[in-house]
Image (cartoon, helix red, strand yellow):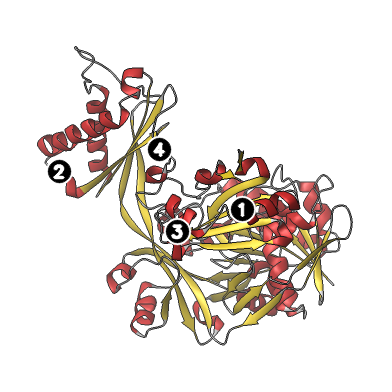
Amino acid sequence: MIKAVAATGQLGTGFKAETLAHAAEGADFIGCDAGSSDPGPYYLGSGETQSSDAAVRRDLELMIAAGLRHDIPVLIGSAGTAGAGPHLARTVRIVRELAAEHGWHFPLATVDSEVSAERVVRAYREGRLSPLAGAPDLDEESIRAAGHIVAMQGPECFADALGRGAQVVVAGRTSDTAIFAALPMLRDIPPGVAFHAAKILECGAASVVERKYPDSMVAFLDPDGFTVEPPNPDMVCTPQSVASHTFYETADPFRLVEPGGTLVTTDAAYAAVSDRAVRVTGSTFEPTGDYTVKLEAASLLGYRTVVFAGVRDPLVVRQIDRFVATTNAVITGKVADSLGISAADYRIRWNVYGRNGTLGPLEPATEVSGHEVALLIDIVAADQQTAQAIGSVAWHTALHQPIPEYSGLVSHLAFPVSPPAISAGPVYGFSLNHVLHLDDPAETYTLTVESV
Amino acid sequence: MTQLHQLARLIRSKNAGPFELTIDVMFADEASYRRVVDAGVLDAERIAALYRVDPADVRLFRADVALAVKVSLPRPTPSGSPTDTDIFGGQFHSPIVCLEVP
C-alpha cells in the first residue's frame, strides 16, 4: 500500500502545520501542485508568480522538513504558477536557500519543461501539433511571438527523477495528476487507480464536504483502488464529495486526458468506509499509442492602464449605456486630436458593474436595478506611456462629460484612488492550445540532479 | 414556480483550461436531481441560447454517482484575453441559477 500526501492544493496557499505533520507519518511521499493556467496568461507570459516567495517558502519549509524527517520524496509540479524557466528558477532558489539555512543535504532534481519557439516551429512544420478545443489559429509568427512556451509533462519526469535518487523534485509545467501518479505507478499501482487518486489529491483538501481553508489530503492506494481520508480531523469526505471533485474543472467528467492515455471513471464506485473516509474503485486507464504533451504559451499584446470609478447620481445611472457610448466617442476624438493616436492603435473597453460588467454581452438582465454602478475603463496600447496618456484623457473626459438634464460643469465620476489612471503593466494572451506528439516522453523535459 | 437554485446544493462554473468553461449543478438528494434531469431543464438548445454558442458545441453529462449535471461549452473568449470579464470563469454559471424547473 502507498500512502500519498498532498500538502495543499496550490503551493503558497498554505495548510495547517499540524495537519501536514500528522499526514506525513508513515507516508511514502509528499506532493504539491504549484501552478495552473487558471489565473490567466499573465504569469506564463511575464515569468512572474502568483504566490509570493514568502508564502512559497513557508509551505516548502514545512514540506521538505517533513520529507527529510521521514526520509520520503517531496514532489513539486508546475513550479511558480506557470512552470516556465523563470518560475522554476525562482522555486529552486527558495529550496536552495532553505537547505542552506537549515543545513539540509539532499539530492535535488529540477525538471525544466520550457520548450523553445524554434522547437515548436519545427514540430508545426512536421505536422506534430494538433489543436485542442477552442485553439487559436497558429502560424510560425504567432509561435515565435510567445514569451514562454511550456510542455505539460506526465508522470515520467518524476519517475525519472526518483530513479536518479532525487529526494526533492521541483518540476516546471506538469499535469496536476503527474505529481501524484508517478510514485504509485513506480510501485505497481495500476494507472487507473494512480491517476484517479492523483486527480483527487492535486487540489489538496478540496474534495472534502466543506473546505473552510486550504489544507492537506491523504490517499491510501493499493492495486484494487484507493481510500481518501482528510488528515485534518475537522474535515470529512463523503462518497458524493469525492465523486463531485472528480468533475472539478474538467470538461468531461468521465474521461480525463493525460499525456499517455485517458483516465476513465465511468464505472468508478465511491463507498464510505467510515464517516470521513471514502473508498474508490473501478477506474481504468486507456493507454494511447501516441504520447502527447499539451503546450501552453502566452504572447505580449500590449500594456494596460485601468480607471475605476463609481457613478451614483441617479440621472447618470439611468442612462449609463448612453453616457458610456457618448463619452467613449468624445475620448476617441480627443485622443486622436491631442495625442495623434488613431483608434486602431489601442483598445478601450468599458466594463459597467451593476449593468453587465461580469457577464458582458451574455448578461440576460436588460435594466440597471441598483442605485449605483462602477465603471472600469480598460485601455491597452502598444506601450505603457501611451496607455497612461490615453487613460488620462479618458478619465478627465468622463469626469466632466455633460448629460442633457444638467447645465453647467459636472463631475460625474467618483474615483476611489489617486491617480485615477492605474498603470497595470504588460498584457498577455494565451497563444497555444495544442498537443505536441512525441516519440519519447522524455523529449520535452531536461532533468538535472544535484546535491544540495 | 421553483427555480434551479432551490433544488441544487451547488451551482458553479470554472475554466476547464483557458478555452473552455464547465458548469456543475449538484444536488443533495436523489429526488431533486431526478426532477431537474427528467424535466430536461438543462438541454443543449437552452444552454446554447443563453451562452450564444452552437448547440453542437455544448456537452451535457449526467453523473448519477455524484447527483450532478455537468455542462461544458466553449468560453465566450479565452481566459485573460482583452475582452474577457472573468479570468477563472467562476461567475459564468449565473444565467442558469434562476432557471425555472417545472
Structural distance between the alpha carbons of marks 1 and 2: 55 Å
Q: Nearer the viewer, mark 4 or mark 3?
A: 4
Q: Amino acid at mark 3?
A: Leu
Helix, strand or loop under label 3: helix
Q: Residue at x 52, y 76 (%)?
A: A445
Mark 4 and mark 2: Cα distance apart in space: 29 Å
Say left or right for A177 vs A419.
Answer: right
Residue A350 locus on image (x, y percent): 32, 38
Q: Quadrant of the N terminus of chain A?
A: bottom right
Q: Which residue is mark 3?
A: A44
Whether labels 1 and 2 share one chain: no
Question: Mark 2 and 3 residues: CB-CB less than 8 Å, in contact?
Answer: no
The residue under label 2 is A341
Of callouts 4 and 3, the N-terminal one: 3
**Marks 2 and 3, Cα distance to the nearest angstrom?**
30 Å
Tell me the subunit letter for badge 2: A
Label 1 residue SS: helix
Q: Nearer the viewer, mark 4 or mark 1?
A: 1
User: Mark 4 or mark 2, which is nearer to you?
Assistant: 4
Left or right: B59, with A348 as reference point: right
Dot 1 crowding, Cα within 10 Å, few <14, some 14–19, many 20+ = few
Q: Report the quarter where the C terminus of chain A lies.
A: bottom right
Secondary element at image label 2: loop
Q: Quadrant of residue A391?
A: top left
- Tag 4 subunit: A
Tell me the residue that label 4 is attached to: A356
Q: For mark 1, what is the residue?
A: B39
Q: Residues within 10 Å of mark 2 (few under 14, many from 20)?
A: some
